[in-house]
Amino acid sequence: MLKSIKISLKDTLIYGLGNIAVKVVGLILIPLYTDPKYFSIDQFGILGILEISALVLTACMASALPQSLTRWFWDKEYKDNQKGIFFMTIATQLVVSSAFCMLLIPISGKLSILLFSKTDWSRVISLVILASAIQAINNIINTLMRLQSRSLLYTMTNLFKLTSVLALTLYFILSKKMGLEGIYLAQVIGNSLVVLFLLGYTLKNLRVFFDKIIFKSMNLYGFPLFLGNISAVLLNVIDRYSLKSLSVLKAVALYTLAFKITSVLKLVIVDSMKLAIGPMMFKRLDTPDNKRFYSKVLLYSSFVMMFAIVGVSLFSFELTKVMTKSKEFWGAVVIVPVLALSIFFINLKDFSVYGLHFAKKTRIIGTIVVLSTVLSLVFNILFIPIWGITGAAIATLLSQFIYWIACYYFSQKVFFIPYEIRKIIIMFFCGAVLSFSSLLVNGMDLLPRMIIKTVLLASFPFILYLFNFYEPIELQSIRGFISKWSKIKNIKSNLSSLKGITDEL
């Protein structure tokens, strides 16, 4: 099992590099997006609505095809026909993406009226639709790279796309003065370049094939997940739609900025771990120590997640002041700890839900996420009129907590895993106290404030030690890790050792 964890860590670091680049580009552009010379605060709010609309569109177009590909790619019965399975999947995605574009682009003006009560943004919405359609195709190819453990190719592709999108975005905004239209034109071109860049790899892994029985089975498996995916995306974006309806665009702008800061945690940590560990979760399904492996994955990923949450929450005030060009955005800081803590439950949900996947109970997943989304809408309607953006953040936290609890409960019923819940509860409350403590010291001068925040962050693992959080073997491994990596002169050989990690599956 230790070898599996080492492999997971190695791949997480590689995937994380690509995902870090995604957020670095996003963070680089925040000063531009918050600069009054180029965008008003209301336009930043509109950008927030467009971004979440793109997520909804991509989820609709994907139709749970990536999950179906993942499930059938490793099925013992079809392992010799992986290229055919991939062909059916990407061919279906091409048809679905094309159909969405032909249906939605002609009515982009009506969609603009629906979202913003005016037709001014119809051209931008058309670009959003096209970019989402191409991204859905890219997602299928990305899934194949993950299934084949092509983490380096995956990361290089991401870096290529991001540098292209960044350069094009800066060109269209700074030189061409295209505003929001320039942002999404850059994404259309960037996504298209990725398709061309991976064309050789894609064709190499294709074999023309179609089987009605397999196709039907994949769709029966995927349809509940499709409903679940849509509801999951809505669960993550309904807060901003609710703010748009119940408040003003400035509130959407502040919430969007806080969400962008905290989404670093999801993309860089949660998504990277899922990309690296997800295929291994299925590979280890029939191994003797699989349940202990699953339990430790949840615990260790939660530890990494909470440490990062505490760090982002503590230093969010400084990050906001550095990144934004206007003091109007500084009010977003108050909801960063709440949104950050909601991502802790997203991570718990993403790993504890595998029991339902193993048991092929995908309909339960769909039902849970639909109900969670409905609850999120109810919470937003109740809390936003009272507490504004803080109410929206609390609604998100409660919704994600309920989502995890439901997934955990039903997963344990069909595929029990001895998770270390006591430790996770201790971790959450210790991390929450440290995260909210940042709001108490933000009024201090810079130097003492930074010293206190740094000490609070460093204290997190030691506070857990006081609660007997670590097992003896874990303490021994930590000491060995520190001893090995603290020797600067051996850094090259230590890095080289990562290349030799293998595992018997």
Image (tube, rainbow, N blue to C red):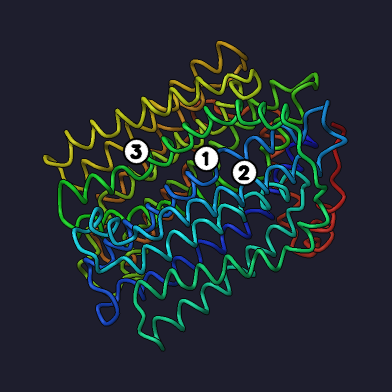
Instruction: Spot the residue most to the bottom.
Output: 175
Q: Amino acid at mark 2?
A: Met
Tell me whether the residue at label 2 lies in contact with that at label 1, contact meaning CB atoms closer than 8 angstroms.
no
Indicate the secondary structure of the residue bearing disc 2.
Answer: helix
| Whole-percent x, y for residue 192 in the image | 60, 67
Tell me whether the residue at label 2 lies in contact with that at label 3, contact meaning CB atoms closer than 8 angstroms.
no
Q: Residue at x 53, y 31 (%)?
A: 225
| Whole-percent x, y for residue 160 in the image | 64, 70
Q: Counting residues from the N terminus, which is met first, the one under dot 2 or under dot 3?
A: 2
| Whole-percent x, y for residue 446 in the image | 31, 67
From the viewer's perspective, tell me whether residue 74 is left or right of residue 242.
right
Q: Residue at x 34, y 38 (%)?
A: 433
Q: Counting residues from the N terminus, which is met first, the one under dot 1 or under dot 3?
A: 3
Indicate the secondary structure of the residue bearing disc 1.
Answer: helix
Above or below 233: residue 196: below
Q: Quadrant of the N terminus?
A: top right
Q: Which mark is residue 433?
A: 3
Q: Nearer the viewer, residue 288 or 359?
A: 359
Q: Which mark is residue 211?
A: none
Q: Nearer the viewer, residue 71 or 44?
A: 71
Q: Which residue is mark 1?
A: 461
What is the distance, in whole Å, between disc 1 and disc 3 at their CAs? 14 Å
| Whole-percent x, y for residue 199 in the image | 74, 63
**Which is closer to the viewer, label 2 or label 1?**
2
Q: Which residue is mark 2?
A: 273
Above or below 114: residue 350: above
What is the distance, in whole Å, between disc 2 and disc 1 at their CAs? 20 Å
Is residue 93 visible to us here? Answer: yes
Is residue 448 visible to us here? Answer: no
Q: Nearer the viewer, residue 131 or 18?
A: 131
Q: Nearer the viewer, residue 433 or 230?
A: 230
